[in-house]
Amino acid sequence: MTVKTEPKPPPTAADALAALQGCADPVRAAGAMRYFKTGPGGYGEGDRFIGVTAPQLHRLSRDLKAMTLEQAEILLSNPVHEARSLALLILVLRYEKGDADQRQRIFNLYLKNLDKVDNWDLVDSSAAYIIGPHLIDRDRYLLDTLAASHIVWHRRVAVLATWHFIRAGELEPTLTLCDRLMADKHDLMHKACGWMLREAMKRDRALVEDWLIARTPGIPRTTLRYAIERLPPERRAWYLALK
């Protein structure tokens, strides 16, 4: 006689938190809090870390990817940084494998909880994999709205989302947003724009170099340094001399 076993229930946010605690390391947590500027006046002020590494988070996301979107949203609301990071990694995996309806639900959930995507690593691990692919064949007005936000993380989401467009061979959205954000005061935005310009240059060096030359010396130095990082040394020196 064959005994039927009950299907295993999907993992919950509580299961995820228990798994995170099993990986926690107070020494790593203290280092992460310094690295992510969680002290007074820092861009990550007040954030909490428990000391879980990126490889551990990626492994846990694969183990827990069957979590329902409702539970993932609960996890995303947790004050612990690694819990939010894990939730976003799960959402990215679910988005990649989801049908049109599930992708729309994940996109909506992401925007609803955008205030939880509140540090550069959280933006960088999610925006190009949820916002970017969702808008590739849709109106991009959302990017303009995010780029105009007073919240630096929203502006970074807008720029990082265009990485998906770059990989698809569409560079204009990146160049347009970098133009718009040229006067941004935040160093993390200078870095984000420079990074995306460097990625765009891999697809069309001549186009991006023309863009850079037309804007040097007015372009922020950090943006320029990031953008030209992969150019030959003599070409980098030429740009920096212009600056």
Image (cartoon, grey):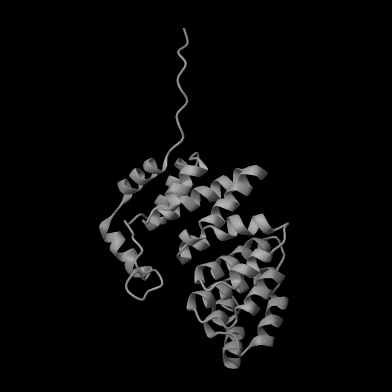
Which residue sits at x=31%, y=56%? Answer: 50
User: Residue 80: horizontal and vertical position, in percent?
Assistant: 36, 56
Q: On the picture, is 189 further left or further right than 57? A: right
Please tell me which residue lies in front, 21 or 243. Answer: 21
Which quarter of the rendering shows the C terminus?
bottom right
Quick check: 141 above or below 227?
above
Quick check: 101 above or below 123?
above
User: Residue 75: horizontal and vertical position, in percent?
Assistant: 43, 49
User: Residue 171: horizontal and vertical position, in percent?
Assistant: 70, 69
Which residue sits at x=58%, y=74%? Answer: 193
User: Residue 202: horizontal and vertical position, in percent?
Assistant: 65, 69
Q: How many marks?
A: 0
Instruction: Report which quarter residue 54 is drawn in.
Output: bottom left
Instruction: Report which quarter residue 155 is drawn in.
Output: bottom right
The outermost residue toward the left is 26
Which residue sits at x=71%, y=71%? Answer: 172
Which residue sits at x=60%, y=52%? Answer: 107
Instruction: Report which quarter residue 144 is drawn in.
Output: bottom right
The outermost residue toward the top is 1
